[in-house]
Every structure is written in C-alpha cells, then in structure tokens.
Amino acid sequence: MQEMNKTRVIVIYGGRSAEHEVSLKTAMTVINAIDQAFYEIVPVYIAPSGVWHCLDAVDGGIASIEELRVKSTGRDIATSIGEALRCLFHRSSHTVVFPVIHGTHGEDGTLQGLLELLNVPYVGNGVLASAAGMDKEMTKRIMTSEGIRQAAYTVIRLHEWENNAADCTARMEQSIGYPCYVKPANLGSSIGIHRCDNREEWLLAVEDAFRYDVKIVVEEEIRGREVQVAVLGTDEPDCSVAGEFEREPVFFDYEQKYMQGPLVQRIPAQVSAAVCEELRQTALRAFRALSGSGLMRVDFFVTEQDEVYLNEVNTFPGFTQNSMFPVLWNRTNGLTYAELINRLIRHAMEKHVRKQSIRYELPSEAYPPASVAGKGR
C-alpha cells in the first residue's frame, strides 16, 4: 500500500515507436534517479504492440532495462489501457505521470491528450506543443510565422510520391537540390534520416523515410556546427548555456548517437557571446511559439559567418544522465539529474493546479429561463 505522505510517480515508457529501445534506457535512468523516500514509483510499460502493462511499485533500483520489459500477451490495446487506468488512478492520492516515450504515440501529443482527459498532472509539454513540435513541417510553419531563420525545405506526402515520383523528384531538385536531407516528418533519434548527394541516394532515402511516416521533409544542407540549447520551465522559462559535440560527423545518425559509445560534449559551445545570446533568445521564442511547458531542447546550426539557423525542437529530448539536456543544465547552474527531475515534477503539479481554475461550463445565470429560451423556435 502506498504511504500517505508519498506522491505516486507513474513512469510510462516503451511505446509503439521506432524509438522504443531508447525509451527503455531513459526509463531506467529516470526511475533510478527518483528519490524513493518521497515518491512511490510505478512503471507502466507499453509494448511495441501497444498493449499496456502496469508493473509493481519499484523497491530499490533497476539493474537492467530487461527488468522493465514485459512479454506481450494476447490482450487488446483498449482492454489493457482500461486495466492500467483502474490500477493506477482508483486511489485519491497525489499522482503525477512522467511520460518517457520518445517518438510516435507518446511524444506526439497522443499520450498527452489521454492524460488531459484523465485530468492528471504530467511532466512535459502539452498536446499542442507535443504534436506541433513532433511534426517537422508544422514546426517549420510556426517558426516561419515567428520570423526565425531556418533551412529551405519542401514537403512530400506518400500519395504524391506513389502517384508521380518523377514530379516529386523534379520539384525537390529545383527548390532544394543536392546535397539535401530527407527526414520522416514525425520521428526522432535520426531514424530514417539520410543525407543525399545525388539522385540515386535520393531515391533510396525517400523509400526508407516513407517506412516511418506518410510525410517527409526535405531540407537544404546548412554547412555549420550543430549547437544545442535547453529550455526549462513554463510561464517564465529559463535557458541553459549552449553545447555541442566535438568532432561531430557530417551526418549524426542513430548508430553514432546510441551504438558507438559516449560522445564528447563541449559545454559551453565555442561560439561568441553575441551568438550565444542569439541562440538563447531564439530558443525562448521557439519555446513560447509552441506553448512549451516543462522542457525542450532546441537545436541550431551556426555557420562560419555566425549565422544562426534553427534546426529542430525536441519536446522530450534525450534524457539519460549523460544526455545533452541534463548535462547542459548541470553546467549552467549545477542542477543535478535528481534535482532536474524534482523540478520537472514540481512544474507539472503547479501547471495542473492552475488549470483547475478553468471553467468548462457557463454559470447558471448565463442561461436564459426556459420560457424565454423556447420563444421564437
């Protein structure tokens, strides 16, 4: 039984996403960092099939991600969700949800929408920011409206490609040209992303990208260093110092991010004070434009001429202890990983309390008497 003085933290992880394994690593790190003296931690695993599994409360640490994995059963998704919700929310105790799902069906606003319907506090960005921030086309449209500089881009949908691939290719070559980057519109961790120097590479890249989404974004190449900034907060967000990776390759793919050992971070990034300030201010503009909440990592390109281009936003960035987001905050103000988690939980609960003052029905005096309302019909 949960101790009455503890807040329950429900950590939801896994999911129907190509970033499933990344989420498991994040979940293990987050669970091990949460102070069990103050919180009861309940893991909820979403299998690749979409079936939900509610695990027992954590007692001690998690030694391996295999402890967080559950073999799928024959249950359907809806039944499993109902069972998990009854298990998790039938008590009247303080509860906050910490979603650590990267990519589709978790970082894209779908899970956030469910949590809004349940009216429970949850860590991180809301439905709008999650959905728009995940969709690269929508992010670019919003940033364009804010006057934020970005690489030239075009969008190709699967039905357009299937109907006339030659026309799509010609349109891309005329507007973007080579080299270019092909990206699934709704995915992260560099999955399905390719750099193309010619038409042969382009055709292969498009076919692969459409394996992960029905819409792709094609961008011109900006020759510059990738520099990242972390944003934390909600109403009055703060911005970290800028960071970058040393000896970053031309294209930073999934294998180089996750399979080839730790990368060397350079924090603060080697940029001028003026560029650093531009990065910080632009990151805050992007955060506010998306109605950000909790956390966001904003990635930029900085050219040799000190021109700043916004590359993308990450509404739930890499979040292990050695990931860029927590390390940036540690180097900015000494914030530890555990303290960062506490702050995110606090932001979630404060945001939830404020939202409870919103009215969802008109006051009784706003309705006319039945005798008046019926006239004229």
Image (cartoon, rainbow, N blue to C red):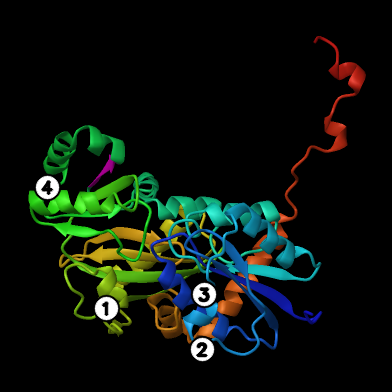
Among numbered discs 3 and 4, the one appearing first in the sequence: 3
Which residue is the extreme one toward the front?
A: 74
Q: Nearer the viewer, residue 173 or 78?
A: 78
Q: CA distance from mark 3 to mark 4?
A: 44 Å
Among numbered discs 3 and 1, the one appearing first in the sequence: 3
* SS type, badge 4: loop
Which mark identifies residue 370? Answer: none
Q: Amino acid at mark 3?
A: Arg
The quarter of the picture where residue 194 lies is bottom left
The quarter of the picture where residue 350 lies is bottom right
Residue that badge 2 annotates: 63
* SS type, badge 2: loop
Categorize mark 1 by other alpha carbons within 10 Å: few (<14), some (14-19), many (20+). some
- The mark closer to the camera, 4 or 2, is 2
The reply, left or right, for residue 115 in relation to residue 316 is: right
Which mark identifies residue 69? Answer: 3
Callout 1 touching callout 2 (CB < 8 Å): no
Residue that badge 1 annotates: 245
Q: CA distance from mark 1 to mark 2?
A: 28 Å
